[in-house]
Image (spheres, rainbow, N blue to C red):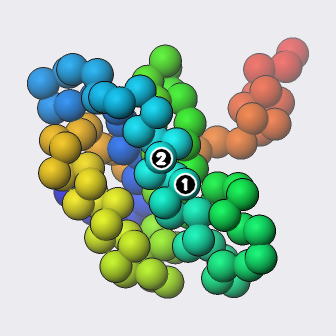
Amino acid sequence: MAADTSKQVFIFGLTQDGKTFRPGDWCERLAGVMSQFRPGGPQPGSHLGYSEWCIPTVVNGIKCIVAHRDLQAEEPMAWDFVMNFAKDNNLQMSEACLVPQSFAKAGTEK
């Protein structure tokens, strides 16, 4: 389990023994289930987009979910659902900080 020091926990689509987790769209499915949990609560049409508290992404070619700790503070049962999903499926997790694309690109300019 990740410690409470970072704002985000990455759940990777790799099991602890390095195998790719299936099905291939697992992170989109999980993020879709979590779409109703968002800052300000569910809004009309909010099911049509992902919550900023549970974002599917790809890191180094590996599908993953970025779970923000604000979800833990606002919706503890939803946070537990995501963390238990990772544990139950033996998925690798890591604390980290998602760097916005615009910031990451700015650092590479000369």
Neighbourhood count class around disc 1 (C-alpha, 10 Å): few under 14, some 14–19, many 20 upward: some
| Residue nearest the observer in this picture, 35 or 107 | 35
- Residue 94 in view, yes or no: yes
Q: Residue furthest right?
A: 110
Corner quadrant of residue 84: bottom left
Corner quadrant of residue 98: top right
| Circle number at residue 13 | none
Q: Is residue 99 above or below residue 3?
A: above
* Residue occupying the point 12% across, 24% down: 17
Q: Is residue 11 above or below residue 16?
A: below
| Circle number at residue 32 | 1
Q: Is residue 30 above or below residue 38?
A: above
**Residue corresponding to mark 2:** 29
Task: Please report contact status of discs 2 and 1: CB closer than 8 Å, yes or no.
Answer: yes
- The three-letter code of the residue at mark 1 reads Gly
| Residue nearest the observer in this picture, 4 or 30 | 30
- The three-letter code of the residue at mark 2 reads Arg
